[in-house]
Image (tube, coloured by chain):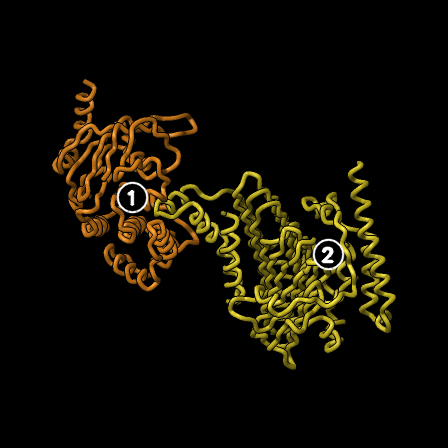
Chain colours: A orange, B yellow
Amino acid sequence: MLIIKNLKAKIKTSEGDKQILKGINLTVNAGEIHAIMGPNGSGKSTLASVLTGREGYDVTEGEVLYDGKDLLDLDPEERAREGIFLAFQYPIEIPGVSNVNFLKTAINEIRKSKGEEPMSSVEFLKVMKEKAKLVDIDPAMLSRYVNVGFSGGEKKRNEIFQLAMLEPKLSILDETDSGLDIDALKIVANGVNQLKSDKNAFIVITHYQRLLNYIVPDFVHVMYEGRIVKSGGKELALELEENGYEFINGIKENAEA
Amino acid sequence: MENNLKENKTDKDLKQKLVEEFKSMESKLNGEASGNFHKIRKDAIAVFDKLGFPVKKMEEWKYTNLNPLLNHDFHYSSDRKQSELKKSDIEKYKFESGEKNFLVFVNGVFIEDLSSVISNSENIYVGNITGGRKKYPEIFEKHFSKYADYSDRSLVALNTAFSADGAFVYVKKNTDLKEAVHILHISDAEKENVMLQPRNLFVIEEGGRAEIAEDYYSKGDNFSFTNMVTEVYCGKNSHTGHYKIQNEGDKDYHVGMTQVHQEQDSNYSNTTVSWGGSIIRNDLNAVFDGRNTESHFFGLYLLDGKQHVDNHTLADHKMPDCFSNELYKGILSGHSTGVFNGKIMVREDAQKTNAYQSNGNILLSDDATIYSKPQLEIFADDVKCSHGATSGQLNEDEMFYIKSRGIGDKNAKALLLKAFVSDVIDSIKTDEFREHVENKLEHKLEYILR
């Protein structure tokens, strides 16, 4: 589904360009859940941004193939229409735009791009109610403005709700667990577990092993200074949690040696 | 220097023509020339003759140049022929939900055949000035030209001098107009350049209620110049919703004065929407002449091309305990220019005044310009006043968030822009007006973001 080859990218800042991704290689197949872990500043969120087409990043080398297509050639909205979804680390508040209107516009634009008819209001409401249940969202909240006045936990649940509505093929969860208490974490994880299938895939970016108790990954990758320095099964997350920085420093020495 | 001389000459040309036209009109009047109404008109033409058209060196006209308009040859004739517009021609101007009280004016002349009124009763008059003046001469005398002072405003003087017709809405004490009034003013420049001087008068007496929309359109390929004045009298404890929607084309000039007089405990709300026209200048002045009045000014300007829209407002707090709130929002693209000049005057006796003002702008192009100028003049010591102005671009984080859900650039912008102006749109209380404006907004955004 997704093949990342030697991806290098820099961020444009007021103090000049800064190389963040220094050669990422990763292959994600349908039906898989990949966890990407690593300390702050290792480039995890940058990877998510580059994959979804956020402005401000320059890809300097490498390529990303999504279903055989050059992903980096597409606009953010085209990527979304092709089935890529980013659950934001910091979901954006949009005053004046209701959740319902926002999602209806999104769904119908995605449908239009595929030459499909728009979803009827009746069907939309039915699907919306169904999916809201999945992440325990009060349907009344959905007539409110996007994320405005939502608590941190509500915003994260709203991200997973949007994911459920849009039914993407590849979902990238950028630190969806940050700021969640254990109950909210369970709700979010439960939502993801119900949505996963052998046709879709998830990339779960997280600092902590905690989330991975509930969303069990097939693969765990450790990112450090813009590279994936180690990959393994779900037990790698536990190892990382136990040994922390020491573990990483060990890898670093190995990498440099 | 040379340019200046040329400008003055043109101004003089049009001015002179208008003064002469006034004399010709006067010679055709019979008994009416000796009446009080004509005395006012005569006085007004003298003021216009003395002052001439406003020029940019006047502080109040600093950003709005009327010279392009004065360069055109406008044939103003006070005895207009009836319009040839048929019922089918005006279908497209009607509100989607149907019309109840619908007044149609073409080039300032009332077209009864195209109009329809259902609310007229012994307590309500909805019609034109000519008819209203005959039916209620004492009400007309009492209010006409009593609020829109022309002594130092040449365009108001010009309108007053030629004020032949316009809408007249009269709601008697403790009467609810119930069905809103839709006033359609069309400038028909199909055959030649036209000049219009529509004059509207709304009198809402004590305890009365009314919702009134003025809707301005143009047709034809020639130039039009609309110089309108609306006077609104809000009696004690009355409630008035007043809307002005400007849909003219890029060969149309529109200057207008809306002068509101508010008595004690009255509530007045105005929403001015400008998305058509070449050069537009709106003045909205409300004088609070009784305690505990409430006033809301909302505005929306949505501009592209070389459009120029100048909104000047004045909330004149003369009495204590009054509240005024003002919110104007603008979306500017292309080479368009917006001007917002909001003045809050709090006079010596106006203690416990609450006056708020805010102007927000989104610039969609590097070539668009906004001049925003809040003015507070406070002569009382126990007041709460605030003002704020912002201008900026669409928020990039919001744009990315929306696009990341599959929504394309154009629709993402449209979503955010609609959200930006939603509080102004929501200020329109009458459903049929609001739906009409929402539909127009959709089309205009579609066009601007094309």
Q: Where is residue A207 shown, x and y percent of the image?
A: 23, 37
The furthest residue to the bottom? B122
Rate crowding at label 1 as few (under 14), some (14 to 19) or many (20 or more) other CA atoms within 10 Å.
many
Q: Which residue is mark 2?
A: B192
Residue B188 at least partly seen: yes
| Residue at x 70% of width, y 57% of height | B226
The secondary element bearing badge 2 is classed as: loop
Q: Chain of mark 2?
A: B
Q: Which residue is at 81% across, 52% downward?
A: B15
Return the x and y of residue B201 as percentages of the image width and height. Answer: 69, 67
Residue B294, above or below B62 = below
Mark 2 touches mark 1? (CB < 8 Å): no
The picture quadrant where one finds residue B327 is bottom right
In this orientation, does residue A87 appear? no
Q: Which residue is mark 1?
A: A84
Q: Amino acid at mark 2?
A: Glu
Quadrant for the C terminus of chain A, please.
Answer: top left
Chain ID, mark 1: A
Q: Nearer the viewer, residue B83 or B48?
A: B83
Looking at the rendered structure, the number of numbered marks drawn on it comes to: 2
Which quarter of the picture shows residue A40? Answer: top left
Q: Amino acid at mark 1?
A: Ile
